[in-house]
Image: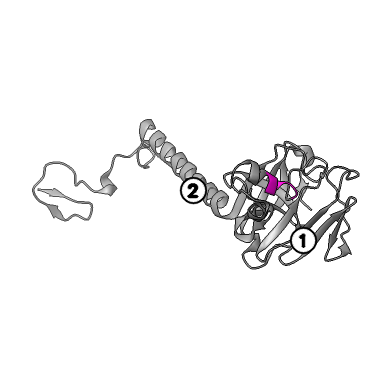
Amino acid sequence: MQYDENNNPVEGGNGPVNTEENAPVTDGGEKAPESLGKRAGKEILSYLKIIAVTFVVCFVLTRFVFVNAYIPSSSMEETIMTGDHVLGVRLAYLFQDPARGDIVVFHYPVDEETLYIKRIIGLPGENVRIESGSVYIDGELLEEDYLPEEWINDNDGYDFEVPEGCYLMLGDNRNVSVDSRFWADKALSAGLATTEEEAEQYTYVEKDKIVAKAWVIFWPFEDIGLVW
């Protein structure tokens, strides 16, 4: 007959009772350490969990909260420079409408697979007139201190009636920017419209085509800063 640690008889076995308390111990009375392979396996599993969680968080953030926009051209200089990376907020207009002066990322009306970044100039229902290098909103001169240089190209003879639910976009670097001034002609050239009247709709950006409001330049290091 064998007895356990409380001096109670134990039947049906010749070896020690197989309990956790009877697991192999070291000389110091502590449990024997796990094997190297088992510890390595746990560490690898832990790293994989961290990677998986990080991936899911990044996916959710970039899909539903932020947009990472690379700027390939000079159309928004010197507010945003060529080669800058801009973080935009997708939820910026969830509870409010876009405002004049906001810099936004949106689907290019002539090719919605392409994202553009421009500044909102005309709001729904407004008349926007471009005359001698100046912009007039419903007859009032728009002060624009963000233009990098004198506006001399395509700076006269434009008159827009912005439809409800739509916005007129211009780049800050007006001398090189391909913006609302040219999109109707682009639509005609692409065969998306056969008349100027049909092409006019491509001049404007509908609110639901605005992807995000530009928030901050995060790369390169020397350009880091908020977008205004």
Question: What is the basis of the colouring in this image?
Answer: one colour
For the point 18% across and 43% down, the residue is: 16
Q: In the drawing, does residue 39 fall left or right of residue 108? A: left
Disc 2 residue crowd, few under 14, some 14–19, many 20+, Cα 10 Å: few
Which is more N-terminal, label 1 or label 2? 2
For the point 35% across and 41% down, the residue is: 31
Which portion, as a residue range, is magenta? 181-185
Q: In the displayed orientation, state which residue is furthest to the top.
A: 36
In the rendered image, residue 112, in percent from the top left (x then y), is placed at 58, 47
In the rendered image, residue 155, in percent from the top left (x then y), is placed at 85, 48
Q: Is the magenta stretch mostly helix, strand or loop?
A: helix
For the point 43% across and 36% down, the residue is: 44
From the image, tell me which residue sits under label 1: 100
Q: In the drawing, does residue 155 fall left or right of residue 190? A: right
The residue nearer to you, when weighing 204 against 83, is: 204
Would you identify the image quadrant in which residue 142 lies? bottom right
Report, in whole angstroms, how far the alpha carbon at label 2 lies from the one at label 1.
35 Å
| Nearest-to-viewer mark from 2 and 1 | 1
In the rendered image, residue 6, in percent from the top left (x then y), is placed at 22, 55
Q: Looking at the image, do the residues carrying marks 2 and 1 touch, with CB atoms under 8 Å apart? A: no
Disc 1 residue crowd, few under 14, some 14–19, many 20+, Cα 10 Å: some
43 lies above or below 1: above
The residue nearer to you, when weighing 196 against 22, is: 196
Q: In the drawing, does residue 42 fall left or right of residue 93? A: left
Label at residue 48? none
The residue nearer to you, when weighing 7 against 114, is: 114
Say what secondary structure mark 2 lies in.
Answer: helix
Check if residue 182 falls in the magenta segment: yes
Say what amino acid the circle numbered 1 marks.
Arg
Say what amino acid the circle numbered 2 marks.
Val
Check if residue 220 falls in the magenta segment: no
Label at residue 56? 2
